Amino acid sequence: MGKESKIKNEGELIAFMILQRDGFSILETNWHFQNDEVDIIAEKKEALIFIHVKARTNKKALKPSKSIDAKKIAIYKDAAKEYLIQKPSKLEIRFDTLNVIIGKDETEIEHITNAF
């Protein structure tokens, strides 16, 4: 496993634990859509939430959520449509980003609701 893949997996695990701690019901992880995937699909209160997890190790690098481009946003929106065809829901749809910056001594987490 490459370094990038290891960081991604670690970031997703941290995000999963944080979301559970914060009362989210995790419905899916790494849900595949076409040639891509949605990192986490969760439910909380009256919302079905598609969550993109972005992990980095360098605090000085571009904030993880700033690296989400129009293509990634379109993939998530198309994935949400497909998910709702497969699993209809009357819940409000929301797209969040969870930034995880993994440091040697501490990990920083930023949850951005309605990120796109």
Image (cartoon, grey):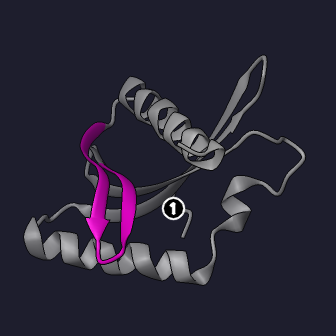
- Magenta stretch holds residue 26: yes
Q: Tag 1: residue type?
A: Asn
- The residue carrying mark 1 is 114
- Residue visible at 61% across and 40% down in the picture: 7
Q: Position of residue 70 (x, y in %)?
A: 59, 82
Q: Is residue 55 above or below residue 51?
A: above
- Residue visible at 38% across and 77% down in the picture: 77
Q: Nearer the viewer, residue 115 or 64?
A: 64
Q: How many marks?
A: 1
User: Where, quadrant-wise, is the C terminus in this rendering?
Assistant: bottom right
Q: Quadrant of residue 51?
A: bottom left
Q: Position of residue 82 (x, y in %)?
A: 21, 77
Q: Is residue 73 above or below residue 39?
A: below
Q: Which residues are magenta?
A: 25-41
- Residue visible at 25% across and 51% down in the picture: 46
Q: Quadrant of residue 66?
A: bottom right
Q: Quadrant of residue 47?
A: bottom left
